[in-house]
Amino acid sequence: MASPPVAGSWGRRRGPGPPPPPASPSRDKSCVLRLAEPRDAPFLARACVMAERAHVGYGIWDVVFGDEVAGGAAARPSEVAEARRKAAAAAEPDALACLEETIAEDEASPFHYSRFVVVRDVHKSDTPAVAAACGFLYPGTQLKTAVAGLADALERRRRGGGKRLRDGFSRLSFLGEAFPDNPAVDKLFGNEAWMIEAVFVAKDYRRRGLGELVTTGAAARGNATGVSVCGINVAVGNGALRVYERMGFDLIGTGDSDACEGRIGVRGFHVLTSPLVSLVHRSLAMRGGDELPVGCTGKATCRCTKCKAELAEMGERDEHWDADAPSSPAPYISPEERRRRDRK
């Protein structure tokens, strides 16, 4: 099985019990879904880092950019958690700076801004991004395709850092054991699928339905690729699992790995899938502020008249995004240029 990408997510810790049936979408109408622009790179970089940290505060970018966290069987859980917290804080400047640069400039990266959708607050004069999610075609684009661009960015930031970053990615070998190994998962990662990554909502905007808005919005962009399945991965113990199940994702497997728990504090990752078309029309319903059409369950290919008409109108050109794209997107401004302007 090919090593799948790692997805971060959001939410509260999950409680026991079966998931409820998919609910009709609702969201804060003061926020709108848009395609990401170069100016969003700083927010998108933070989204990548924070999403991977999930509910444990330590994620793969901290492993890649940071130092090894001392631990072992004799270490107390509180001591290990504190060591990870310090390692994450130390790794964050390099992680954010390198991710920001590649998000803005590296078109080969799965995290290039063109692969993101964002939510903007219409009441803010400069309409900053307050939520984001990334979508890309797997296996055509993978985490490993980001290595070269990130290594070059770190080399420019810290001489010799490029080699360190490539070595850092070798530390992620534990991920091979962190995902379930069963026929359904093998089928997902052995064929083309639209993958969702880096789902993140700013703290002040949570519990408003924006997580679902960006997740389904990122999924909707896969409509033009011709693939039929959308996948997402969630760290074990993360309450986002419940949220994705309510959207219509089905759990197809859960990883269980001592190595993964030792490195980042989680036993593994849940893998979930959904028919892409059901997420597309769910996105349309959320963006229009309407209830799901009658007959639409949100879990299977919708055959209601309204959804078939909307999907046919979208076609393969992703037209429903054209009206959202600004005529002249705001350019990316590097951290160095921002500091120079601030000094003036």
Image: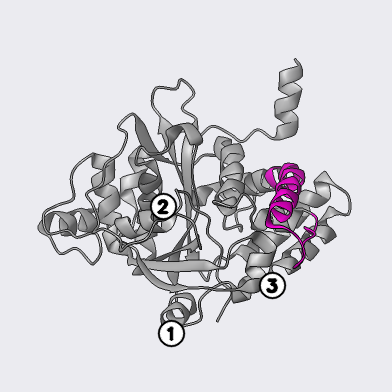
- Which of the two discs, 2 and 1, labels the residue nearer the N terminus? 1
Q: Quadrant of the N terminus?
A: bottom right
Asked if 26 appears above or below 125 in the picture, the reply is below
Percent x, y of residue 92: 71, 44
Snapshot quadrant of residue 16:
bottom left
Q: Mark 1 highlights which residue?
A: 183
Q: Amino acid at mark 1?
A: Pro
Q: Which residues are magenta?
A: 67-96
Say which quarter of the image contains residue 148: bottom right
Q: Which residue lies at the image location 34% right of the left edge and 41% below the top edge? A: 209
**Residue at the limit of the structure toward the right, as seen here:** 159
- Residue appearing at x 11%, y 58% in the figure: 305
- Of mark 1 and mark 3, the one earlier in the sequence is 3
Residue, disc 2: 218
Say which residue label 3 marks: 173
Q: Secondary structure at mark 2?
A: helix
Asked whether 134 or 109 is in front, the reply is 134
State which quadrant residue 149 falls in.
bottom right
Distance between the Cα atoms at labels 3 and 2? 28 Å
Q: Secondary structure at mark 3?
A: helix
Q: What distance separates the C-alpha of mark 1 from that of mark 3?
A: 22 Å
Name the residue nearer the viewer: 109 or 80: 80
Query: Is the residue marked by circle 1 packed among few (<14), some (14-19), or many (20+) residues within 10 Å?
Result: few
Q: Residue at x 73, y 43 (%)?
A: 89
Give the CA separation, mark 2 to mark 1.
26 Å
